[in-house]
Image (cartoon, rainbow, N blue to C red):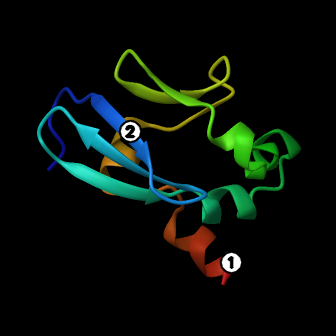
Amino acid sequence: MIPETLNITSVEQVSDYALRLSFDDGTAQTVDFKPFLSSSRHPDIRAYLEPARFAAYRIEYGELVWGDYDLCFPIADLYQNRLLTDSALEMAA
C-alpha cells in the first residue's frame, strides 16, 4: 500500500540508468530507467539515453526530475518500480 503522502528523500546512481531512491517512509527502491528510455519513440525522452544527460537528475519538492520537468515520473510508479505497463513490457520483449 502506498502512503497518502510520499516524498523522495535521496537518490544515488547505482549503474548507467539505475537509481536507488529512498522515500520518507523508509522504503528504498532501485529503479532501472533503461527499459523505459529505450522503448520510448519520443526523441526528447530518448535523449536521456545519453549518460551525462541522464545523470543530471535532481530531487525537487520530493520528486525526481530532469531539466525543467522535461522528464519526471509519478511518485507512485517510482515507489512501486513500475515505469512500464505490462502491455508495454510485452511489446518490448
Residue 82, placed above or below residue 48? below
Answer whether labels 1 and 2 touch (C-beta < 8 Å): no
The residue lying at 72 percent from left, 41 percent from top is 52
Residue under label 2? 11
Residue 23 placement: quadrant: top left
The residue lying furthest to the right in this view is 43
Query: Observer-nearest residue: 1 or 32?
Result: 32
* Residue 63, visible in the rendered structure: yes
Which structural element holds mark 1? helix
| 45 in relation to 70, above or below | below
Asked whether, in this view, residue 79 is left or right of residue 46, the answer is left
Q: In this view, does 43 lie above or below 70?
A: below
Q: In this view, does 5 lie above or below 90?
A: above
Q: For this rendering, which residue is in front, 20 or 86?
A: 20
State the image coordinates of residue 7 (x, y, percent, origin top left): 27, 28
* Amino acid type shown at disc 2: Val
Q: Is residue 43 left or right of residue 15?
A: right
Residue 8 location (% of width, % of height): 31, 32
Label 2, secondary structure: give it: strand
The residue singled out by tag 1 in the image is 91
User: Which residue reaches farthest bottom?
Assistant: 93
The residue that appears at 12% across and 42% down in the rendered structure is 26
- Answer few, some or many: residues within 10 Å of disc 1's Cα (few below 14, many 20 plus, some between 14 and 19): few
Name the spot of residue 79 as percent of width and height, x first.
31, 47
Residue in view at x 62 percent, y 22 percent: 69
Residue at (16, 30) in percent of width and height? 4
Horizontal and vertical percent for residue 82?
43, 58
Q: Can residue 81 be seen in this view?
A: no
